[in-house]
Image (cartoon, grey):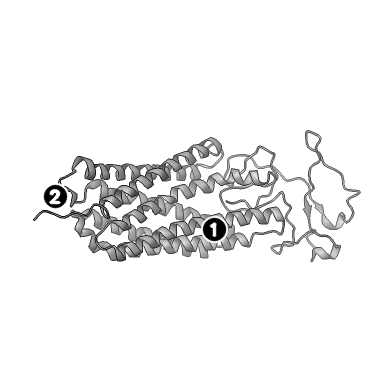
Amino acid sequence: MPVVVHFNNTYGALFISNILTAILWGATCVQLYFYSTTYWNKDTWMIKSLVFAVCLLDTLHQAFSTLSNYEYLVTHWGDFDYIETLNWSFKAEVFPLYFTQFFVQSFMVYRIYRFKKNIWLPAILELTVVAYFGNALSYGIRLVKFSQLADLGSLNNQAISCVAVNTFNDVAIALVFAYVLQQQKTGFQNTTTIINRIVIYSLNTGICTAMFGIAAIIATLAAGKSDLQELFFLTGARLYANSLLAILNLRNRSRLVNNKNEFTSLGHISNRTTSAGEIHDLGSQTDQIETPDQIALKSIVSLQNVPQRKNAFGIPTPLKIKLNKHTTSVTDYKTPFPSNTNGGYAQSEQKVLDSV
């Protein structure tokens, strides 16, 4: 009896996933070009190493995926004995994805630590990231030992557990980061607007990857011996490199929203002003510039006696307002400036969250 192979939900699903991941690889290349021309000479070697590693892993996966599909659908087309086996490139393509997910999620956790300055919550999140990474490597090692496509069914339970933990990590990291950002609001409209933009973007990123994970779990449970789950897993896993580069490149876009604001890729409250074309980021190799003198709020109930500062072009520069350290409430001086509950200081619109 001839072997019956259902190509639509097996190699058809793998072929479609290869097309989608190729599109995502192209988007990664575009974002990498933008990052290289904008931030490469400004970011630290740690950030640049992370970007290089993630992009290299992304390229390796695309190469393995394309080679695997070519072997099945071109080189050995019509060879029913071969298409029932697992070729080496099919087994190898999962490992770059596992490392990419681990690196990107660890970077997200590190951003939370930079904001929170508390080791316990980021440590718990990182433990779940490491747990997924260990479970995923175990799955990959077991996969290497198999030779037949039919053997994949025995790995379904572990595959579901891996994707479930990874989905939880995506959602948890996004929600915690959004919560931490909400605590950084200073009360100024521009700062609040930018924080809201970052929160929305972070939630969308986590939810998007989580949706692919949920779809992969459903496909694993419902599709039986098909490879539909590979379509969702492989495509969703390739979103991580794009998310990382988008986060880093968003710093420049955020500056365009309000040229008074300065952003970096990690959590920090900026303590300086920047010129129109200057880019500053945490861990940058550029030199720090001291902030100009700040005027106690109780000394300027009337602004008539405050000296006007001008830049090199003779254009007046905005004042930086700072509450006196002993001031208990801004309303004591009947001023409209909001207070910052994190220390009694009102952050000016020139000082916004140093994150993306």
Direction from residue 111 to residue 229 in the image, left or right:
left
Q: CA distance from mark 1 to mark 2?
A: 50 Å
Residue 335 lies, with reference to residue 240, above or below; the image says below
Work out whether residue 22 or residue 124 is closer to the camera in this orientation and state it.
Answer: 22
Instruction: Name the residue: 53% across, 35% down.
Output: 37
- Count of marks, rendered view: 2
Query: Please, which residue is most extreme toward the left here?
Result: 1
Mark 1 is surrounded, within 10 Å at the Cα level, by few (under 14), some (14 to 19) or many (20 or more) other residues, namely many
User: What residue is shown with label 1?
Assistant: 112
* Type of amino acid under label 2: Asp
Q: On residue 81, which mark appears? A: 2
Q: Earlier in the sequence, mark 1 or mark 2?
A: 2
Q: Position of residue 197 (x, y in %)?
A: 60, 54
Q: Position of residue 324 (x, y in %)?
A: 80, 58
- Quadrant showing the N terminus: bottom left
Query: Please, which residue is most extreme toward the top here?
Result: 313
Q: Position of residue 16 (x, y in %)?
A: 33, 48
Q: Is residue 349 visible?
A: yes
| Helix, strand or loop for disc 2 | helix
